[in-house]
Image: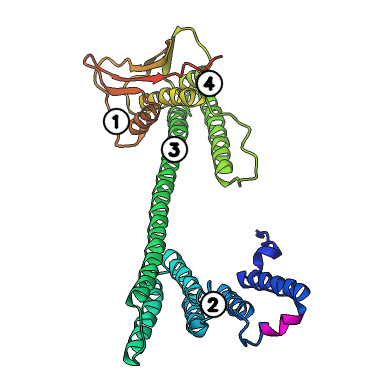
Amino acid sequence: MITEPRTPLLRRLPAGVWVAAFWTAIVVFRFFTRADELRHLLDYDGNTEDMPMVVTAVVTTLVAFLLVRLPLAAVAVALAGGVFTLGMREVPATCPLQFLIAEAVVGYCAAARSRLVSTTAVGMPLALLAGLYLWGTVNGQVVNPYAYGGLAATVLIAWLVGNTVHQSRAHVEALRGRATGQAVTAERLRIARELHDMVAHNIGIIAIQAGMGSRVMDTQPAETRNALNAIEATSRETLAGLRRMLGALRAGENESAPLEVAPGMAELDRLVDRSAGAGVRVAVTRGGEPRALPADVDLAAFRIVQESVTNVVKHSGTRDCHVTVDYRPHELAVTVVDLGAGPPTATPGTGYGIAGMRERVALLHGEFTAGPRPEGGFRVAARLPIPVEVGP
């Protein structure tokens, strides 16, 4: 059973708890420093220092508790604090402070909530400001339209800032989703190429050996036994490769990767021997000075030779091919030529062999060609760049 680690206790506490603890610490501090004036914290009778602090403490604590679950209620609480502090003439900055808290909540709603919630949040302080302005005008009070207009402008600015953050996050998420989709697609193609190259070659060998064994079963028992042994060995090798690949796919992040290395050009002689067992004679010519290759180049070169030989086994009318491996200073050139005297007796299928080889070479920024030769047969050629930094 998979169990997720529990969130630490301090992170599970709501934000309102921390805000309440902050204001409690301030009250306790004032108690020890000015104990004779503690009664003014709860009774506003002209004390211009403590009562606005109490209102601000209550508003910020309630806003912190309501912000995540009920953001619109948090806006309403902040606006109520602003209306309540309108009459505090001795500390005129208290009312704008409450509106500033409401504007902060409006910006949060625009950044983290849906468009409906954000528009409702920005509409609440604007409606309140409009109502206060009209109420003061109707009752003959002196109202400053610039003050109300300034507060309304700050509300709109807070919403615009939050909306910009919301759009930026959405853009980043879209880019991340697109990159993730591309990575998943690339990984699927890589797995598909590996499965095709590994399974198609071995199944082709098994099909040839099975056909050969069935033809000589009655007349040449020894050849039939050899064919069955080859089928058994190839089948075991295919199953082992599939187990390694499935194990790598199912391995978790904390599990170790398979110890088996990917095949490379060092396995070329073994590939030639298996192909000979299937009745395909593969001649290999090596040019240049053989050296260690990057893992991706080594694997791609081997898979190209393997798939080309598989096509000879499955589609070509001949049983001879020539493989040329040329180690050049900055690249590896691989050529596989079907030595048939005429066109193949069976046209290549519409599978993914050549497409997979072309994709491998393209990923390494190399060159790839494949097609019938004028004199007959088929030719596959690839040039794979080798980074200069790679040494033996």
Disc on the earlier residue, 2 or 4: 2
Q: Which residue in the rendered view is the most extreme toward the left?
A: 374
Left of 29 or right of it: where is 105? left
Q: Position of residue 11 (x, y in %)?
A: 65, 63
Q: Amino acid at mark 4?
A: Glu
Q: Secondary structure at mark 2?
A: loop
Mark 1 or mark 3, whichever is nearer to me: 3
Q: How is the image coloured?
A: rainbow
Check disc 3 and report the residue beneath it: 190
Q: Does residue 229 sit above or below 374 in this rendering?
A: below
Q: Amino acid at mark 1?
A: Pro
* 43 or 237, nearer to the observer: 43
Callout 1 environment at 10 Å: few (<14), some (14 to 19), or many (20+)?
some
The span from disc 1 to disc 4 (Cα, nearest Å) is 26 Å
Disc on the earlier residue, 1 or 3: 3
Q: Does residue 274 sit above or below 49 in this rendering?
A: above
Callout 3 environment at 10 Å: few (<14), some (14 to 19), or many (20+)?
some
Mark 3 or mark 2, whichever is nearer to me: 2
- Check contact, mark 3 vs mark 2: CB within 8 A: no
Instruction: State the image quarter where residue 382 is shown.
Output: top left
Mark 1 or mark 4, whichever is nearer to me: 4
Residue name at image x 61 percent, y 85 percent: 46
Residue name at image x 62 percent, y 88 percent: 45
Check disc 2 and report the residue beneath it: 91
